[in-house]
Image: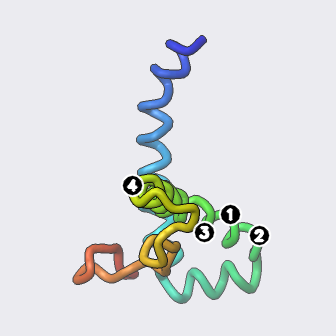
Amino acid sequence: MYKDAEKSYGSELLNLVVAKGYLTKLVANEAVRSWLDRNTPEFLEQFELVINTARMEEAMEQQARHGTDEPDAAAEPTAPQDEASGGLAAE
């Protein structure tokens, strides 16, 4: 059972990374974000959870490295960044 889970983990992680990238770019578009917020706020909330997943993992890693119970303020989830600062920008 462990081996089966280990085999599927790679493809599931790849799917999550692709979905996260797409959702990050989609939600960064102000027109799309506004429409989602007005018409389907529950979808927007779930999209943001997916987008922030990797950031939470980073926060947990930093917490473990520093040996504290509180994540670093810099590791808190933030809005998507533009390309100049290393993130994705809306087109």
Mark 1 → mark 3, Cα distance in angstroms = 5 Å
Q: Which residue is mark 3?
A: 48
Left or right? Give the position of 58 relative to 50. left
**Which residue corresponds to mark 1?**
46
Q: Residue 36: which quarter of the image? A: bottom right
Mark number, residue 65: 4
Q: CA distance from mark 3 to mark 4?
A: 26 Å
Residue 51 on image: x %, y %: 53, 64
Q: Quadrant of residue 47?
A: bottom right
Q: Residue furthest left?
A: 84
Three-letter residue code for mark 2: Glu
Marks 1 and 2 close (CB-CB < 8 Å): yes
In this rendering, the answer to whether 15 lies above or below 7 is below
Q: Residue 42 bears which disc, if any?
A: 2
- Dot 2: element: helix
Asked if residue 84 can be seen in this view, the reply is yes
Q: CA distance from mark 1 to mark 4?
A: 29 Å
Question: Tag on residue 56?
Answer: none
